[in-house]
Amino acid sequence: MTSPDNVARLRRAAPAVLLLVVLVVATMLRPGAGTLRLASPDRSHVDQLRQAIGDLPSEALVLIACDGDLGTYPEIRATTRAAIEDLGAHGARLAIVSFTPEGRAIAAAERDRIARSGAAEPPADLGFIAGAEAGLVRAVSSVVPAAAQGPTFDAIRQRGGGIGAFDMVLIVSGSDISARSWVEQVGPRLPDLAMITIAPTFLDPELEPYLRSGQLRGLLATLREGTAYADAVTSGPAADRGPGIAPLPMLVGMLAALAALAEAASRRLARRARRPSRRPMS
Amino acid sequence: MRRTILAGIVLVTGLVVLLDLLIVNPSLGDAAGAVNELLVLLAAAAAVGGGATLVAHHARNLAAGDGDSIGSVVLLLGMAAVLVAGLRPGSSGSADPAVLWLIAALLAPIAASLFALLFIFVLGAIRRGFVLRVRETSLMAAAAAVVIVLLLPLGGQAGDWLAAGAGWVRDVPLAGVFRGLLIGIGILVAVGAARSLLALDRDDD
């Protein structure tokens, strides 16, 4: 039995259900090359970041500061994984640290993924350092846990045991700690430290000036730049990076948003046109 | 009096950290390091205190039957699950498989779902906005539509033009407004801090 109420309810839910079905189908389809393109045609940021990594000395020590947040990390996940692959392909010795609890969760999951894939050695785990920016300042002089054992930890200790021991820092930025905190807190204390960052799009206006001033050596802060970079890094099978972001579902979502905006605006205009004029009749 | 003591502490610690950045001196470095250690301890204590307050608040709500009981139970159970997984004997803390599973199977999908729902809620808010405030909502919707069009992931020459337009919007108007806001906030914070340090807000005593 279907009551009129149920029919009305179904009719209201129909657009959302239809959109969901279309999005699911869109994630399964692969359009022909050239029709849709997510990667940014402007490769300047990608080239800058690749050059910064390419300039590293052999067996360079690179610190991955993983402070993404669970909400925005999916946007930069594929780019971060591509960067870790890229650094590994250049023979860098990696260590990973976090200054936020969510960043620590992401870092532990990434280490676990690399260890399970067996394709490379996971980054040496420097763990979580409490205190947010105060912890960042403390890590300038000491970043290695006392009980940590291994060749990478020994190499860091031999070079002083702090962030200054590293040739470069890859900052995975999030809403709490971003490359801005690094530029402000670590930059003045270690002016020779090369810093590159991967950030979600909302941080781009904040971080772009640091790239132009040279305080950051590389910045990937939009999905399109990240995709271009991930495409450019060809070492290793792409399937290891987990689910990527396909252009077709994105296009469907954007068109749905435009349609909803147009429908809301036209409905408002139609209502205004139907409203009787307030001017007195002469 | 209490305000003067607090202002004095802020002044002294601020000056120590600032001087440590400007002058290379081991004693000054040690003093700034000690201040920083205290700050780390303070942050850790604040985090633990915040967690304990949250637990106490929801436990009190449950006991009194106030508020959203189901929400309180879910929150307390969630906290307990993560704490037990990370602190039980033999656990490897945040790298423990149970903690990783809780994050990968529960926390990350929940956070991603909430962010995905923003898409629906923002569109719903714009629809309501057209009813309440037509001019402001029209302006916002028009700007959003322009940005969406510029970000359409099209290939070919059209895609290049759109991408160039999106880059210009990001680099010029958006960056300009954002930097203006940041500079304004910076000036306000500096003035506020200076007034506090120089005890110019004595009227509040």
Image: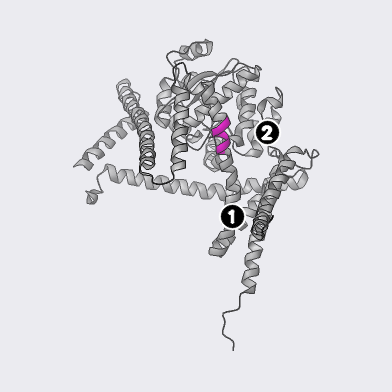
A66 and A185: which is toward the camera: A66
What separation in Å lies between label 2 and label 1 (alpha carbons)? Answer: 28 Å
At mark 1, the secondary structure is helix
Image quarter of residue A211 = top right
Q: Amino acid at mark 1?
A: Gly
Q: Could you classify mark 1 by the number of other residues whose Cα lies within 10 Å: few (under 14), some (14-19), or many (20 or more)? A: some
**Number of the front mark, 2 or 1:** 1
Chain letter of the residue beneath label 2 in the structure image: A
The answer to whether residue A18 of the structure is visible from this angle is: yes
Disc number placed over residue A244 in the picture, else none: 2
Q: Where is residue B62? Give x, y as percent.
A: 39, 41
Q: Where is residue B59? Give x, y as percent.
A: 37, 38
| Quadrant placement of the N terminus of chain A | bottom right
Q: Residue at x 64, y 59 (%)?
A: A5
Image quarter of residue B43 = top left
At mark 2, the secondary structure is loop
Q: Is residue B48 left or right of residue B113?
A: left
Mark 2 and mark 1 on one chain: no
Q: Where is residue A191? Give x, y as percent.
A: 47, 27
List the single residue furthest toward the front.
A1
Mark 2 touches mark 1? (CB < 8 Å) = no
**Which region shows up in magenta?**
B105-111
Q: Could you classify mark 2 by the number of other residues whose Cα lies within 10 Å: few (under 14), some (14-19), or many (20 or more)? A: some
The answer to whether residue A99 of the structure is visible from this angle is: no
Chain letter of the residue beneath label 1 in the structure image: B
Q: Residue at x 43, y 28 (%)?
A: A136
Q: Amino acid at mark 2?
A: Gly
Task: Provide the major secondary structure of the magenta segment.
Answer: helix
Q: Which residue is disc 1 drawn over?
A: B124
Q: Is residue B1 left or right of residue B110?
A: left
